[in-house]
Image: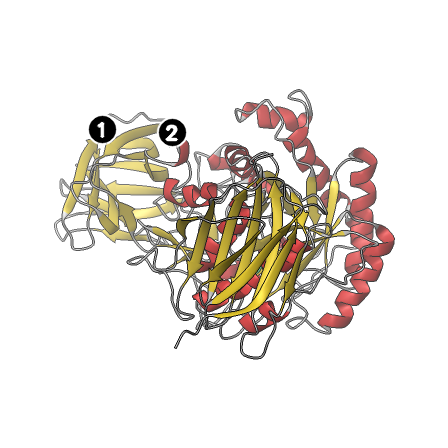
Amino acid sequence: MDKTRTAISLSIGADRPGARINPAMWGIFFEDINFGADGGLYAELVKNRSFEFPEPLTGWSKISPSHARGQLSIRQDDPFAPANPNYLRIESRAAAPLGVANEGFRGMGVRQGEAYQFSAQIRNVSGSPALRIALYSARGHLLDSVQLQGFSADWKKYTTVLNPQNTDAHATLYVLVEGSGVVDIDMVSLFPEHTWRNRAGGLRADMVQLLADMKPGFLRFPGGCIVEGSELAYRYQWKNTIGPLENRQLVINRWNYEFLHRPAPDYYQSFGLGFFEFFQLCEDLATQPLPIINCGMACQFNSCELVPLDQLGPYVQDALDLIEFANGPADSTWGQVRAEMGHPEPFNMNMIGVGNEQWGPQYVERYKVFAAAIKARYPEMQLVAATGSDATIFPNGKAEIEYLWSQWRALGPEIVDEHFYRNPEWFAENANLYDAFDRNGPRVFVGEYAAQSVGVASPDNRNNWQTAISEAAFMTGLERNADLVVMSCYAPLFGHVDAWQWTPDMIWCDNLRVYGTPNYYVQKAFSINRGDVVLPVQLAGGQTDSQPGFFASATRDESAGEIILKVVNTGAEPVTAALRIDGASQLKSTGLAMTLSGGLADENSLDEPRKVAPVSATVSGVKPEFSYTFKPHSLTVLRLGETA
Ligand code: AHR
């Protein structure tokens, strides 16, 4: 029996263009969660390189064969960097090697054929010992080894290169004193030479590439709850994340202890990926920076600590200084810091979020102080305010959100950030969420969302096709309402398969590999097929009992001269729709279809990274009225060329 149904007709008003679409419509949310920065995007392989974790030898183990004599100690006297005072002293009193091994972030991923730059600050204290730098595989095979010697009596940086003989995802780095003598070491680092744009001390190229492929409109940074800190002392302070690495002070990562069921006691923020690197990445990706700053409130899911209103000054100053760091002339105080880091030109930031998931009158009071100060100095800066968290997961969520919207309508931030962590059914059912939304007020930023297959942040959540296709249905609603919804992003971004705290996540990695989930391919499909202007779509016969899920949106890409139609069929049957393009200028007879489809339970994985991935095909017979069959459980993007 042919199960294809033809009950649906879909018309596109090509002659009735609507709202212009914000070029920053589809973006990226970055947070250091799930080892997203340290152990993930930031390509450093050594964990706790400066011995500053509260247990200074976390990540390190003593290597001391029975014929070795000597000891290890953590010291602070006459340090290399007073901001990070701890260093390791290795005192060896025998010829046998003595030292330490670093386990990396759940191991170190190294590749045969690639070079790895070892560096450390080293000071010779007595004798003239050498240092053996070696990489071993998880099974204990030597991958490479070099000797460093001739150290000065003052702190000095020494470097060498390791070339592993084999590829290993869980290698270990050894640093051993050979010969008797005493040396001090600090800032021990091992970096792949191949990084994104081959920057020394840079980012994992394979992970950035997936982001670049999305052509994101903006990059939100640094989160997420990490902005707030569980207590104010642990909030994200951008000034601690710039300048020489040895001056960036470590902070415990809030996801270290947030979930009892997923503890990560070795999770700290080294800030090797800090605010300069964030702006630089935005520039690389040609995307707009969207920093989110702490507004004088710690996380309201944790301590709820508040900065008294009359003590907000330094917090507000941090926000103003951040804008100057990004945009100020190279001879301004903070612009000069940026210039000294190698970027005299401004980064052209034009929006800033005040607070992440904050709610209640205390938030509004603090927002007002920030808004007044920022607008007084930078009237062009667009402000992003929040509506707390997902209404279902914070106290009195619905009432709080209504309260905040009433405040924002009066106070007038340009953009308001909404978060949705719901089940897949909710996303499909709410594709019309913004259809009748009050347009008299700020624009909407759907700043965190992801379908949760089991429950919010449940460890059993899956990045399966069902979650992705439901998000796609929802996104057609965002696109249709692009006059109101000006930005959106999936959250969280990264998950490390051996070190995650929160799932689902858009992109997963291990120490060597990375893959995009079906949710990633949905985000990418919308982003790379954005278009410049919304075209109205009319569906008839779509929402029947047997075929409840058929969703569509359309745009025009003016420079390409193409109509872009996105159709989501969440039903289990193929649907042949009668398409009508009203008022199109001459249509090319062939177009392009990009289809994502699969079983609802289908997932991608490290071993099968493209089980759900886009398939492209030519569409023939395109005319003002033609029919097209949409696969079951599919997202289809049709690009139809106009000739005049
Ligand atoms: O995306 C994960 C977390 O969810 C974010 O840090 C927070 O803003 C939200 O509660």
Whether residue 415 is visible = yes
- Nearer-the-camera pick, 399 or 211: 211
Ligand 1 resides in the quarter of the picture at bottom right
Mark on residue 149?
1
Q: Please, what secondary structure does the residue beneath circle 1 have?
A: loop
Relative side of 6 to 133, left or right: right
Q: Position of residue 504 (x, y in %)?
A: 47, 64
454 in relation to 35, above or below: below
Residue 263, percent from left and from top? 44, 66
Image side of residue 519 versus residue 447, left or right: left
Q: Name, please, the residue furthest toward the top.
A: 331
Q: Position of residue 76 (x, y in %)?
A: 44, 42
User: Relative to residue 534, is residue 600 depicted above or below?
Assistant: below
User: At 58% from the left edge and 79% from the top edge, which residue is drawn?
Assistant: 545
Q: Which residue is rendered at x = 49% and y = 75% of the image?
A: 454
Q: Which badge, 2 or 1, comes first in the chain's sequence?
A: 1
